[in-house]
C-alpha cells in the first residue's frame, strides 16, 4: 500500500512549472507548499516542515546548490528528502548534486507519473530509515523517539520534553562527544536564549530520573552518552 500523502515543498522560479507540478501532486493526495527561490525556500521550509523538497538548480538570488548546502546545515533538514529538478542533463551535474546530499536528480521536462514514482520511492526510503531509528535500545534502557517515552528495566521514566530531546540526541551516537554549542542549537534552537547552565541542569535531572550513570561530562568540551 502506498505511503502517501505527505507534504512537499516545490522550489522553482518558473510559475508554469510550479503550477504543473502542484496540480499533479495535489491529485495524488500531497499537501503542497511553493517557493520561487532558495531564500524563500528556507523560510517556507521552517514553517511548512515538508517531508520532501523538490529543488530546482538554476534560480536567481540563491540557486539550488547553495540552498541544499544551507538546508543540510539546519538540524531539522539534515535528513529531509530532497530531489533536484533541473534542465541540466549532464552526468557531471548529476554527480555533483548527489554528492552534495540530494536524494535524487530528475531532469526536465518532467513526466508526471515518473515524478510521482520517484517521489514515492524517496519518501519510502526516508520513512523506512525513520522507522528503523525510532527506538534506541541499550540493555535495559529503551528510548522511543516516536512516542517520546523512556523505559528502564520495564519502568517508564517521565522526562520533560527538552530532557527527552537532550537524552535522545546524545544517545543517537553513543561515545561521540557533543559540544555544548551544538547541543544548545539542536535542542533549544538558535531563536531561544538560554542560560549557560541550562544543559547542566537538564543533564542532572536526567541522571536523577533514570537512576543510572549514562551521560559522561567531558570537562570544558561537552557531553557524551555511554552505558556502563
Image: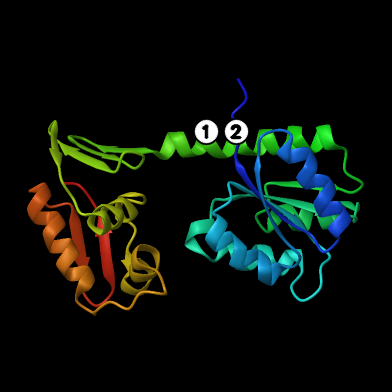
Q: Residue furthest top?
A: 1
The answer to whether one can see residue 13 in this image is: yes
Residue 56 figure quarter: bottom right
In the rendered structure, the answer to whether residue 121 lies left or right of residue 145 reads right
Residue depicted at x 88% and y 54%:
16
Residue depicted at x 18% and y 63%:
202
- Horizontal and vertical percent for residue 90? 91, 53
Give the position of the N terminus as an image quadrant: top right
Q: Answer yes or no: do the residues labelled 2 and 1 have beta carbons within 8 Å?
A: yes
Q: For this rendering, which residue is in front, 40 or 137?
A: 40
Residue 183 figure quarter: bottom left
Residue depicted at x 79% and y 60%:
12
- Does dot 1 land on a helix, a strand or a loop? helix
In the rendered structure, the answer to whether residue 208 lies left or right of residue 191 reads left
User: From what the image shows, is residue 32 above or below residue 13?
Assistant: above
The answer to whether one can see residue 212 in this image is: no
- Does dot 2 land on a helix, a strand or a loop? helix
Residue behind mark 1? 128
In the rendered structure, the answer to whether residue 113 lies left or right of residue 192 reads right
Other-residue count near label 1 (Cα within 10 Å), few / some / many at <14 / 14–19 / ≥20: few
- Horizontal and vertical percent for residue 153? 12, 33
In the rendered structure, the answer to whether residue 94 lies left or right of residue 45 reads right
**Colour scheme shown:** rainbow
Residue depicted at x 41% and y 39%:
133
**Residue 124 numbered mark, or none:** 2
- Horizontal and vertical percent for residue 159? 18, 50
Amino acid at each position: 500500500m502506498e505511503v502517501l500523502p505527505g507534504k512537499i515543498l516545490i522550489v522553482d522560479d518558473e510559475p508554469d512549472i510550479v503550477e504543473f507540478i502542484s496540480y499533479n501532486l495535489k491529485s495524488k493526495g500531497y499537501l503542497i507548499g511553493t517557493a520561487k527561490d532558495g531564500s524563500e525556500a528556507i523560510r517556507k521550509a521552517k514553517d511548512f516542515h515538508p517531508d520532501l523538497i523538490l529543488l530546482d538548480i538554476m534560480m536567481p538570488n540563491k540557486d539550488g546548490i547553495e540552498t541544499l548546502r544551507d538546508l543540510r546545515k539546519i538540524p531539522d533538514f539534515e535528513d529531509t528528502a530532497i530531489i533536484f529538478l533541473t534542465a541540466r542533463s549532464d552526468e557531471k551535474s548529476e554527480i555533483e548534486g548527489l554528492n552534495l546530499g540530494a536524494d535524487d536528480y530528475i531532469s526536465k521536462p518532467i513526466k508526471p507519473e515518473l515524478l510521482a514514482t520517484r517521489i514515492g520511492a524517496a519518501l519510502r526510503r526516508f520513512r523506512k530509515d525513520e522507522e528503523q531509528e525510532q527506538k534506541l535500545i541499550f540493555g535495559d534502557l529503551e528510548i522511543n523517539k516516536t512516542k517520546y517515552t523512556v523505559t528502564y528495566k520495564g519502568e517508564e521514566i517521565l522526562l520533560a520534553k527538552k530532557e527527552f530531546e537532550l537524552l535522545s540526541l546524545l544517545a543517537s551516537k553513543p561515545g561521540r562527544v557533543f559540544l555544548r554549542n551544538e547541543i544548545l542549537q539542536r535542542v533549544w534552537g538558535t531563536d531561544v536564549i538560554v542560560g549557560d547552565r541550562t544543559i547542566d541542569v537538564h543533564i542532572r535531572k536526567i541522571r536523577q530520573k533514570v537512576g543510572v550513570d549514562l551521560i559522561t561530562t567531558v570537562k570544558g568540551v561537552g557531553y557524551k552518552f555511554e552505558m556502563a
